[in-house]
Image (spheres, helix red, strand yellow):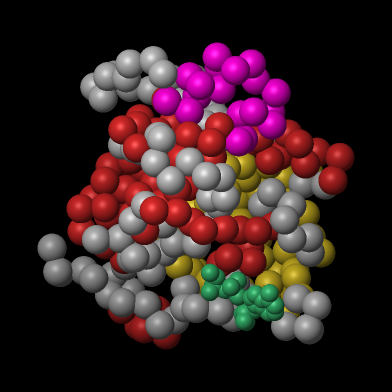
Amino acid sequence: MPVTHPDTPPPIVSANGRATLEVRDLQFAYPDGQQALKGVSLEMAAGEKVALVGPNGAGKSTLMLHLNGLLHGAGEIEVAGLPVVKANFPVIRATVGMVFQNPDDQLFSPTVFEDVAFGPLHMGFPEAEVRQRVVAALTAVGMAAHSSRLSHHLSIGQKKRVAIATVLAMSPEILVLDEPSAGLDPRGRRQLINLLRDLPLTMLVSTHDMLLVQELFPRMVIMDEGRIVADGATAVLLHDVALLEAHGLEAVIGSR
Ligand SMILES: Nc1ncnc2c1ncn2[C@@H]1O[C@H](COP(=O)(O)OP(=O)(O)O)[C@@H](O)[C@H]1O
Ligand SMILES: [Mg+2]
């Protein structure tokens, strides 16, 4: 393994590592008939960081699973100008890095190294580059010292960081994170905030953590019952206590 220097910024994100995202009138029902998305439209500029909030069952995860074609509803989705259709899945899945809420859904190899190497290996990179990508991605999430550990022995916070590394190793242009701070202790949460702040990627992050929203995301989108009910500047929406309460969200203004 090459020696890593924690101070050196990892060469993980290319200079043009950003892409736009556009969702138009997306509707989706699960096979049991549950209508989870009832006409969702959302545009994100390249490099924009957007928080996706709303009560449990609002449709946040369902929306996210559409962004790289894991679910397919009615309506249109474009990633970096490319429609999310089967023919484009290889490019789309390299462009959109999807981190699931539960890291156990993302980590399935024996060791941390193998988990992070899986994506780049399957993208066909030569072994030396795979190795370099794994080291850079683990360094970016502060887990370089743990590459030979068994993934299932890690703490929840460490698993979450490795799950993020598995997608960073593929140099995504859009990062989609489903409740990344849930279950983290204060230090893990702080490390996550610093990591996300420093990553110059287009980012859509679902969360119940309103302090995280306030600190990291200039724009927030509120979903409830399968619809977007508000989309605007975080600084404005976080002051709208009636709006927040109507959608089961905590007002945090004034607490810091
Ligand atoms: N696999 C599934 N089968 C049927 N209904 C589901 C499934 N997953 C989620 N749902 C339903 O879809 C709606 C949206 O869920 P979800 O996208 O998980 O919301 P959120 O991520 O905002 O909590 C909810 O009513 C939920 O019960
Ligand atoms: Mg969810």
- Residue situated in front as seen by the camera: 207 or 113: 113
**Residue located 76% across and 36% down the image:** 90
> Residue 161: percent from the left, percent from the top?
39, 46
**Residue located 73% across and 34% down the image:** 91
Residues in magenta? Answer: 118-135
**Residue located 40% across and 82% down the image:** 248
Query: Which corner quadrant holds the C terminus?
Result: bottom left
208 shown above or below 107: below
244 sits left or right of 28 in the view: left
**Residue 129 falls inside the magenta stretch:** yes
5 sits left or right of 219 in the view: left
**Residue located 75% across and 69% down the image:** 27
> Residue 5: percent from the left, percent from the top?
27, 19
49 shown above or below 134: below
- Residue situated in front as seen by the camera: 133 or 21: 133
> Residue 79: percent from the left, percent from the top?
68, 41
> Residue 210: percent from the left, percent from the top?
31, 66
- Residue situated in front as seen by the camera: 19 or 111: 111
**Residue 124 falls inside the magenta stretch:** yes
Could one spot residue 82 in this view of the protein? no
